[in-house]
Every structure is written in structure tokens, then in C-alpha cells.
């Protein structure tokens, strides 16, 4: 079994030049286990400090419309972030593969994304990369904003600038 820190890798979801995303589980007492998302980061040692500071702030952000970040760590010389494995599709993918959402569904996405941003801004945190790629919509229509407070994880090829910037 391949592990990253205390997390046992179940499957690799994506790989790129900046690292990889894996679905993992963390075992607990009496057979308890939780599935998590682990982002293994390809970082130079001097780049870890700013990400560690941002990750620490992100770990303190708890809101029903945010994908939670739980841990920033190092394993075998590689840095990683671990957090909630949110189920759903990005708004980007949803809009590309589905028909236009109904007006109530669209307003729900806008309202729940706005609630997440309000929570961040009340704590002095800018998301830094609000885009259809970072908005997740579950099968039931619940909305979660991912990568909150971690703008350095944005796609470096993107020309998009978040409205907050």
C-alpha cells in the first residue's frame, strides 16, 4: 500500500507538473476510516514556507460552502495538503457537459458561492482564484468552493484573474 503521511492512497485522480491529486483514506480506531483528498505538491524547499502559512490559515476556515483543508505536511521529502473529499463536478465541467441550468439552480450556485466568499472576506482571506473550475456542485445541488486561501495552487496557465484581485 502506498502512503502519503498517514494517508493510504486508494487511487490517483490527476497528475501534473505541480504535483498530483489522490483519493486516500486515513484509518482510525476500531475500523473507522475516512476518505480524503490529498494533493501532493512539487515544491522547492524555499517555496514551502509561504504555502505552509496559507495552508495554516486555510485549515481554520470552516463553512458548509467551503471544501475543508485539514493538514499540510511533508512525507519522504514531498509536501502535501490533505482535506475534504468533496463529491461533485466543477461548474466548468457541468456547464460544458450539461444543458443550461434552471434559473433556481443557477441562483443557488451564485448564492452559495457568495456565502463562501462572504465567510472568507469576513476573516480577511481572499480566495484568489474564483472561477468555474473552483466551484463544485454536488448531485443534490449543494455548492462548495475549493482551494480557499490557496491562490498559489491556481492553474499557472490560466489568464483568469479573480474578481477580488
Image (cartoon, grey):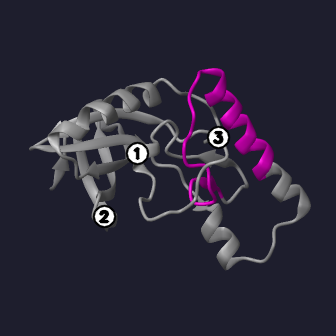
Residue 7 falls left or right of residue 125: left
Give me the C-alpha separation between circle 2 and circle 3: 32 Å
Name the residue at 59% across, 39% down.
Answer: 66
Q: Which residue is mark 2?
A: 12
Closest to the observer, 104 or 154: 154
Q: Residues within 10 Å of mark 3 (few under 14, many from 20)?
A: few
Q: Position of residue 11 (x, y in %)?
A: 30, 63
Helix, strand or loop at label 1? It is helix
Q: Position of residue 113 (x, y in %)?
A: 71, 44
Specify which label sits upstream in the sequence, 2 or 3. 2
Q: Which residue is mark 3?
A: 164
Q: Position of residue 39 (x, y in %)?
A: 33, 50
Depth-wise, is mark 2 or mark 3 nearer the camera? Answer: 3
Q: Residue 56: name its quadrant.
A: top left
Helix, strand or loop at label 3? It is loop
Give me the C-alpha separation between circle 1 and circle 3: 15 Å
Asked whether 110 falls inside the magenta stretch, the response is: yes
Q: Which stretch is magenta?
A: 109-138
Q: Which residue is mark 1?
A: 152
Specify which label sits upstream in the sequence, 1 or 2. 2
Identify the image quadrant of the C terminus: top right
Q: Position of residue 129 (x, y in %)?
A: 55, 49
Mark number displayed over residue 96: none
Amino acid at each position: 500500500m502506498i502512503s502519503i503521511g498517514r494517508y493510504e492512497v486508494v487511487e490517483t485522480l490527476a497528475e501534473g507538473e505541480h504535483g498530483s491529486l489522490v483519493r486516500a483514506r486515513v484509518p482510525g480506531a476500531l475500523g473507522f476510516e475516512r476518505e480524503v483528498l490529498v494533493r501532493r505538491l512539487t515544491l522547492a524547499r524555499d517555496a514551502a514556507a509561504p504555502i505552509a502559512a496559507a495552508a495554516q490559515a486555510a485549515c481554520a476556515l470552516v463553512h458548509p460552502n467551503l471544501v475543508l483543508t485539514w493538514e499540510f505536511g511533508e512525507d519522504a521529502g514531498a509536501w502535501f495538503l490533505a482535506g475534504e473529499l468533496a463529491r461533485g463536478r466543477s461548474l466548468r465541467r457541468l456547464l460544458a457537459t450539461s444543458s443550461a441550468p434552471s434559473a433556481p439552480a443557477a441562483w443557488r450556485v451564485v448564492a452559495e458561492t457568495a456565502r463562501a466568499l462572504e465567510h472568507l472576506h469576513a476573516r480577511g482571506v481572499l480566495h484568489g482564484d474564483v472561477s468555474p473550475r473552483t466551484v463544485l456542485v454536488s448531485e443534490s445541488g449543494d455548492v462548495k468552493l475549493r482551494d480557499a486561501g490557496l491562490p498559489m495552487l491556481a492553474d499557472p496557465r490560466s489568464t483568469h484573474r479573480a474578481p477580488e484581485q
